[in-house]
Image (cartoon, rainbow, N blue to C red):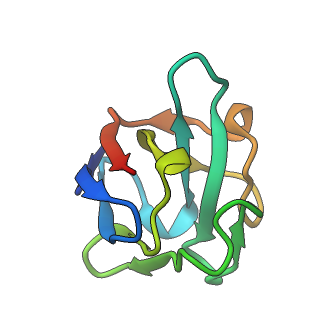
Amino acid sequence: VQLQASGGGLVQAGGSLRLSCAASGFTFDDYAIGWFRQAPGKEYEGVSCISSSDGRTYYADSVKGRITISSDNAKNTVYLPMNSLKPEDTAVYYCAAFSGYGCSLVPYDYDFWGLGTQVTVSS
């Protein structure tokens, strides 16, 4: 099982980034993919998730209206375009796979995790 997050970087406040999560080693359609982030000294925070089977999505209140998660099942990849980025969005972003029903923003629900990608938003 492998989850590879990419697309992070350094961007000015108000800018945009698109994160990608490429999955392999499991049946993609049977899992939801979630994005989480961890800022220095803080707990993991659920950002968004998408169910690969029915396309159901959830967003944290902190990112609603600025992020639209999408899934390309043919490529086993989930995308997280982020707009109007703020300094408080600075964190390491991780993607993870969830085998339960729908999707979840609770980190402990997830079965597999990938390495993170750093997002830094300067003011």
Left or right: residue 22 compared with residue 97 = left
The quarter of the displayed image where residue 94 is located: top left
The quarter of the displayed image where residue 47 is located: bottom right
Does 49 appear above or below 120?
below
Does 31 appear above or below 57?
above
Q: Position of residue 108 (x, y in %)?
A: 72, 31
Q: Give whichever of 92, 69 is nearer the camera.
A: 92
The quarter of the displayed image where residue 44 is located: top right
Extreme residue in the front direction: 123
Residue 22 seen anywhere in this rendered image of the structure: no
Q: Quadrant of the N terminus?
A: top left
Residue 52 seen anywhere in this rendered image of the structure: yes
Extreme residue in the top direction: 41
Does 64 appear above or below 44?
below
Left or right: residue 92 compared with residue 52 = left
Residue in view at x 58 percent, y 36 percent: 111
Q: Give whichever of 14, 46 is nearer the camera.
A: 14
Q: Give whichever of 79, 32 is nearer the camera.
A: 79
Q: Position of residue 7 (x, y in %)?
A: 23, 57
Q: Position of residue 78 (x, y in %)?
A: 39, 68
